[in-house]
Amino acid sequence: MVVHLAFLRAVNLGPKRVFPKADIHRVVGEVGFDEIETHLNTGNVRFGTRMRARPKIEVALERAFARDRGFEVPTIVFSAAEFVQVAADTARLDDEHPGLARHYVYLLKEPLDADRVAEVEARADERGRMIVLGRAAHALLRPGYQDGQVDPLAAANLLGVATNRNANVVRTLAAKWC
């Protein structure tokens, strides 16, 4: 049994994309996964499975979520070991960039090619910068970047299928679930 974490994109963001964590838990169990836990009501779920191939796990979950909800739910899956590395990178970047106003971590369905990484990282300006490490793109935002804005560098549209979590959530989930 391998532990995985799934991050659901664009759920519970309004009246039409409601997916309560109890329902997420139920649907993940119906897929045949076990040791299921959810965190808050933001589309974070931990589970165990004998399946090994990440794309197959993502497809199984996305199909089950769509059947249950009636809308697409893009799902990004990391093994616990992969997510430990994302959390370690997050902590290291925080240490290397003291005084950040915000640190958002975009979790990517697929890794970016070198040209796309260069394009994303070139978005740096006085508001902050992006650093791509594997299937995670870190938005390191300086004070004054415009509070409340998640994508002031306009880089999210370059990332493909992705969802973001703040650095605190990434660290919390790694400590709790990995």
Image: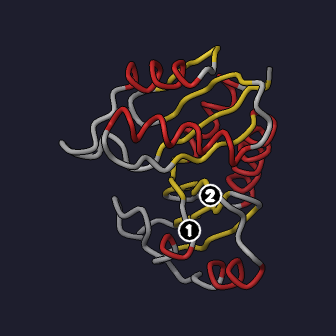
What residue did someone put label 2 on? 108
Q: Nearer the viewer, residue 48 or 101?
A: 48
Instruction: Tell me residue 93's x, y (percent).
Output: 72, 56
Amino acid type indicated by mark 2: Leu
Residue 168 quadrant: top right
Residue under the image location 39 percent in, 36 percent down: 67
Local secondary structure at mark 2: strand
- Gap in angstroms between the C-alphas marked 2 and 1: 7 Å
Amino acid type at mark 1: Gly
Q: Are marks 2 and 1 in contact (CB under 8 Å)?
A: yes
- Label 1: few (<14), some (14–19) or many (≥20) C-alpha neighbours in 10 Å: few
Q: Where is mark 1, residue-wise?
A: 160
Residue 175, numbered circle: none
The image quarter in which residue 68 lies: top left
Q: Secondary structure at mark 1?
A: loop
**Residue name at image x 63 percent, y 56 percent:** 109
175 up-or-down from 127: above or below: above
